[in-house]
Amino acid sequence: MNEDPTSPAEPGMLPLLAAAELQDHLMTVTNDLERLQRLLDDAGEALSAHFYSASTQIQTLLRQAAESGGDSTILHAVMENIAGAITALQFQDMATQLIAHTSQRLRNCSDQLARDTFGDDEDGEAVVEIAPLRPNPVTQDEMDAGSIELF
């Protein structure tokens, strides 16, 4: 191995310190993305629970209005808004897919960097996270009513 950790061992290779710093950044970003995914999951679950609860309560009010002959126009409008909000929650599912995909790609880069630069494995069988086969798991980039594309 080269004595100077700041110079590459072979032409075209990253210096060891630069490679180590890059690997640290990749792992930090991956950890941040995983934390973001947990936050999105928690928010999505809470929003879903509240919207479904509100929807159930409004369904009860709609039945009561129908039984009493009352006007339920406003309740129907509220139900449409809740249905739209529930549809928008599918954003969380798409975001989760993108985060998982990106995390897997970053881990693959970090693992390859470690294996190729540091030789982290004594027997030469370093485990490298498999890169995703598809370039992007989500093809949508907007949320319109009726345009939800489920995986």
Image (cartoon, grey):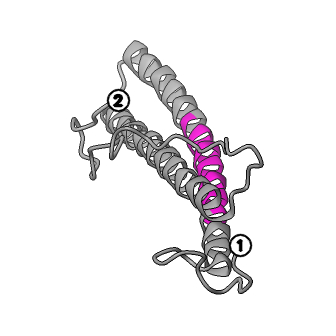
Provide the major secondary structure of the magenta segment: helix
36 or 101, nearer to the observer: 101
For residue 115, side relative to residue 90 (left or right):
right
Give above or below for 63 relative to 85.
above
For residue 41, side relative to residue 151 (left or right):
right
- In the rendered image, residue 127, in percent from the top left (x then y), is placed at 65, 42
For residue 81, side relative to residue 96 (left or right):
left
93 or 85, nearer to the observer: 93
Which of the 4 image quadrants contains residue 151? top left
Instruction: Name the residue that disc number 2 marks.
Output: 151
Q: 10 Å neighbourhood of mark 2: few (<14), some, or many (≥20)?
A: few
Give above or below for 30 relative to 18.
above
- In the rendered image, residue 108, in percent from the top left (x then y), is placed at 54, 50
In terms of secondary structure, where does tag 1 sit?
Answer: loop
Q: Type of residue at label 1?
A: Met
In terms of secondary structure, where does tag 2 sit?
Answer: loop
Instruction: Name the residue that disc number 1 marks.
Output: 1
91 or 6, nearer to the observer: 6
Q: Which of marks 2 and 1 is in front?
A: 1
Q: Does the magenta stretch include residue 126?
A: no
- In the rendered image, residue 44, in percent from the top left (x then y), is placed at 56, 42
- In the rendered image, residue 138, in percent from the top left (x then y), is placed at 33, 42
For the record, the magenta segment spans 27-48
